């Protein structure tokens, strides 16, 4: 972590920058904070990349890739820039922990027991990556963070969806030398076995402090290193005996001879004696690592609580207000500034019968559209005045003169419900589907931030397909008795599905009871969706 440079902006995308975290092939990485004090890793994109003709599509694909890979071993997307913004940026959760590369460079290789536990944890991370239909393609020491409770696999910036043939072309080397698979080193198609190879190479580094194709103290030119990866046997001196045979198998030149991520996870559990992933890591991490994380967390707290420096108006001699710019004031009753509505298939209006084509049915039935949350109490804890019922033509509630800036703590948690689906539909103009289940997970955050996600599962009766969508929810506005969320990203819940899920939907809930949320008919609503969600945790 380094101090900001004189030319660095004070904020990006409304998030105040606190420090520099590094730089990469796409751009620079900053430590930032939200209005509510949540730390973020905010990655900007080099301007020359953003000017490329196909950049917008590739950047959107990176965001959706990150959003699909969600697990205990990965970090979540929090927010991202809109098309046309300069610079383009992506914000994720920030982990105050050193990378494996930083740690080994400063302190040397990990103890054998910690390497075995790291292998068990990272194999589980790789299983979740595969389950999301993603190939990472750049597993390296710099992309493994050593948290005190578990390691994290980060930076899916060059990951591409497996099922997208446009990103499996040959002729380009993608990845980091020293940890590339032979197929990557030759510019061939890199699929899931490439990640297994790279993971094994990272484990060799964790145990020895070097790539499996570089001797201690040796420096190689890139062509010589790539030749060794393709033709030479790996150097495995120093790898713990309990891992040696399995690491050698993972480093096979032929991708077909390597174990799958699932097989690797299972076999590591057997050879290490760790039935659960988290059994060994916390017990085996060096005490110096725990102390290092403590120092980083203390520095993070200092940065998060340090007031921003005073801003100076151009040409002026005194400090201007350091507060972030406020949105223009609107008169009571003025609708909030939502984007223009996207045209939808016929029959999407509130309280109207649905007419959904077979092609559109997958996306339409999967979304529970128009989400706003009403509370029986105001933000100050007093009983709120009864809300005026909107007219059927209203898409969102009107603005209130009093508003909050963050999601109340009472909303945080996981909520789920099951609706009847549409079993009586004709299967032509509307898909026949059963048990429309919806799960909404919300976490703390401020207006303008991603605060959770909505996962829907909807099984088509005739084919058994899951027509559900998974969406990242941004908190758009909170007023005295309501709040509005928008789906900023959306993709099929079933990773093998071929239909598209529309983003930009607005979602509405009412908190009728402390542990029960009611779906509103305000705005558009999907047929067969659950009428209420109950708190799970």
Image (cartoon, grey):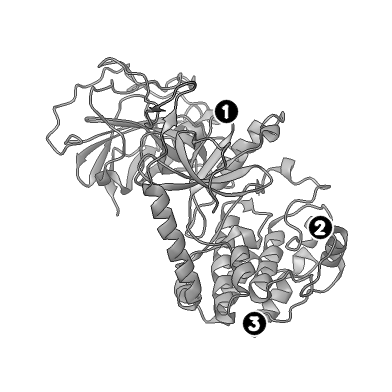
Determine the CA span between mark 2 and mark 1: 34 Å
- Crowding around mark 1 (Cα neighbors within 10 Å: few <14, some 14 to 19, many 20+) is few
Q: Nearer the viewer, residue 400 or 216?
A: 216
**Which SS class for mark 2?**
helix
Q: CA distance from mark 2 to mark 3?
A: 27 Å
Report the quarter where the C terminus lies.
bottom left
Residue drawn at x 26%, y 40% is 517
C-beta proximity under 8 Å, tags 3 and 1: no
Which label's residue is closer to the chain start, 2 or 3? 2
Q: Give the quarter of the image for residue 200.
A: bottom right
Where does the image place residue 250, in percent across and percent down from the top left? 71, 70
In the image, residue 240 sits, relative to residue 421, either above or below, namely below
Q: Quadrant of residue 450?
A: top left
Tag of residue 83:
1
**Tag count:** 3
User: Which residue is disc 3 drawn over?
Assistant: 240
Image quarter of the N terminus: bottom right
SS under mark 1? loop
Name the one closer to the observer, 8 or 354: 8
User: Could you say where residue 322 lies in the image, as x and y percent from the top left?
Assistant: 38, 32
Q: Is residue 478 left or right of residue 310?
A: left
Residue 185 has which mark? 2
Residue 46 pos. (x, y %): 66, 37
Residue 427 shows in this picture: no
Instruction: Give whichever of 106, 84 is nearer the camera.
Output: 106
């Amino acid at each position: 972590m380094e101090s900001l440079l004189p030319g660095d902006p004070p904020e990006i995308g409304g998030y105040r920058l606190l420090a520099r975290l590094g730089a990469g092939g796409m751009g620079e990485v900053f430590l930032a904070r939200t209005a509510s004090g949540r730390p973020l890793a905010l990655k900007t994109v080099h301007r020359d990349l953003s000017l490329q003709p196909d950049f917008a599509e590739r950047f959107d694909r990176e965001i959706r890739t990150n959003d699909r890979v969600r697990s205990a071993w990965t970090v979540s997307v929090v927010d991202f820039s809109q098309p046309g913004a300069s610079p383009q940026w992506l914000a994720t959760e920030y982990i105050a922990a050193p990378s494996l590369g930083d740690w080994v460079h400063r302190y040397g290789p990990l103890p054998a027991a910690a390497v075995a536990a790291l292998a068990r944890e990272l194999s589980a991370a790789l299983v979740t990556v595969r389950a999301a239909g993603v190939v990472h393609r750049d597993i390296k020491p710099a992309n493994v963070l050593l948290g005190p409770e578990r390691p994290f696999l980060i930076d899916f910036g060059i990951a591409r969806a497996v099922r997208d043939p446009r990103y499996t072309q040959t002729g380009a080397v993608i990845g980091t030398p020293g940890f590339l698979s032979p197929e990557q080193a030759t510019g061939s198609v890199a699929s899931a076995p490439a990640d297994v190879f790279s993971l094994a190479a990272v484990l060799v580094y964790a145990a020895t402090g070097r790539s499996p194709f570089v001797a201690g103290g040796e420096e190689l030119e890139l062509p010589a290193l790539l030749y060794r990866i393709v033709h030479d046997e790996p150097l495995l001196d120093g790898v713990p005996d309990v891992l040696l045979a399995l690491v050698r198998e993972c480093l096979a030149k032929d991708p077909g001879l390597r174990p799958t991520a699932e097989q690797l996870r299972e076999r590591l559990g057997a050879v290490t004696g760790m039935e659960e992933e988290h059994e060994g890591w916390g017990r085996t991490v060096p005490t110096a690592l725990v102390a290092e994380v403590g120092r980083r967390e203390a520095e993070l707290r200092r940065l998060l609580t340090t007031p921003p420096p005073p801003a100076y108006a151009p040409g002026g001699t005194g400090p201007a207000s350091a507060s972030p710019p406020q949105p223009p004031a609107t008169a009571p009753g003025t609708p909030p500034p939502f984007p223009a509505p996207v045209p939808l298939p016929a029959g999407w209006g509130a309280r109207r019968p649905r007419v959904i084509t077979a092609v559109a049915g997958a996306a339409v039935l999967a979304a529970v559209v128009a989400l706003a949350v009403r509370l029986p109490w105001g933000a100050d804890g007093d009983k709120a005045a009864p809300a005026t019922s909107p007219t059927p033509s209203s898409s969102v509630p009107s603005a209130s003169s009093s508003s909050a800036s963050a999601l109340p703590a009472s909303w945080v948690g996981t909520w789920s419900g099951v609706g009847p689906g549409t079993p009586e539909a004709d299967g032509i103009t509307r898909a026949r589907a059963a048990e429309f289940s919806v799960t909404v997970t919300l976490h703390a955050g401020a207006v303008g931030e991603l605060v959770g996600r909505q996962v829907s599962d909807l099984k088509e009766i005739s084919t058994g397909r899951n027509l559900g969508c998974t969406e990242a929810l941004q908190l758009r506005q909170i007023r005295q008795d309501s709040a509005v969320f928008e789906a900023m990203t959306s993709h099929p819940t079933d990773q093998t599905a071929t239909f598209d899920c529309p983003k930009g939907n607005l979602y509405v809930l009412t908190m009728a009871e402390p542990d029960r949320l009611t779906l509103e008919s305000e705005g558009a609503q999907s047929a067969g969706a659950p009428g209420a969600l109950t708190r799970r945790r």
